[in-house]
């Protein structure tokens, strides 16, 4: 499946450690959200496309809804 402007990246131990730190800091309590956020931040991405409003309250990332 191909999507314009979609980049896939490998998750490594550094990303997983970042995700754990984000969870410890209560930035996001959900493991999947923490992994997505850590990956975005590690890749220098500042916007995430998601309908998950939990991302609205996280500094350093801007959420764009799927229907935007």
Image (cartoon, helix red, strand yellow):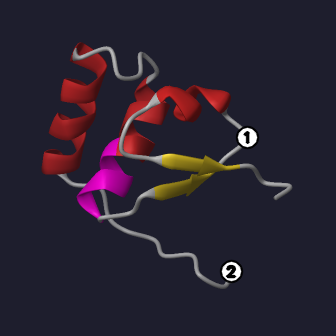
First reached walking from the N terminus: tag 2 or tag 1: 2
Residue 11, horizontal then vertical, whole percent: 29, 56
* Foreground disc of the pair 2, 1: 1
- Is residue 41 shown in magenta? yes
Farthest residue, direction right? 67
Residue displayed at 48% across by 76% down: 7
Q: Residues within 10 Å of mark 1 (few under 14, many from 20)?
A: few
Q: Is residue 2 left or right of residue 8?
A: right
- Is residue 7 shown in magenta? no
Q: Nearer the viewer, residue 21 or 56?
A: 56
Give the residue at mark 1.
51
- Name the secondary structure under disc 1: loop
Q: Quadrant of residue 40?
A: bottom left
Say above or below: 64 vs 23.
below
Residue displayed at 50% across by 27% down: 57
Residue stretch rendered in magenta on the structure: 38-43
Say above or below: 18 vs 14.
above
Quadrant of the image containing the N terminus? bottom right
Residue 62, horizontal then vertical, whole percent: 52, 49
Q: Quadrant of residue 6?
A: bottom right
Give the residue at mark 2.
3
Q: How many marks?
A: 2
Say above or below: 30 vs 51.
above
What kind of secondary structure does the magenta stretch mostly adopt?
helix
């Amino acid at each position: 499946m191909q999507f314009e402007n979609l980049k896939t990246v490998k998750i490594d131990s550094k990303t997983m450690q970042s995700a754990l730190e984000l969870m410890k800091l209560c930035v996001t309590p959900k493991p999947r959200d923490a992994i997505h956020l850590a990956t975005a931040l590690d890749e220098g991405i500042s916007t995430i496309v998601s309908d998950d409003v939990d991302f609205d309250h996280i500094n350093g990332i801007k959420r764009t809804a799927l229907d935007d």
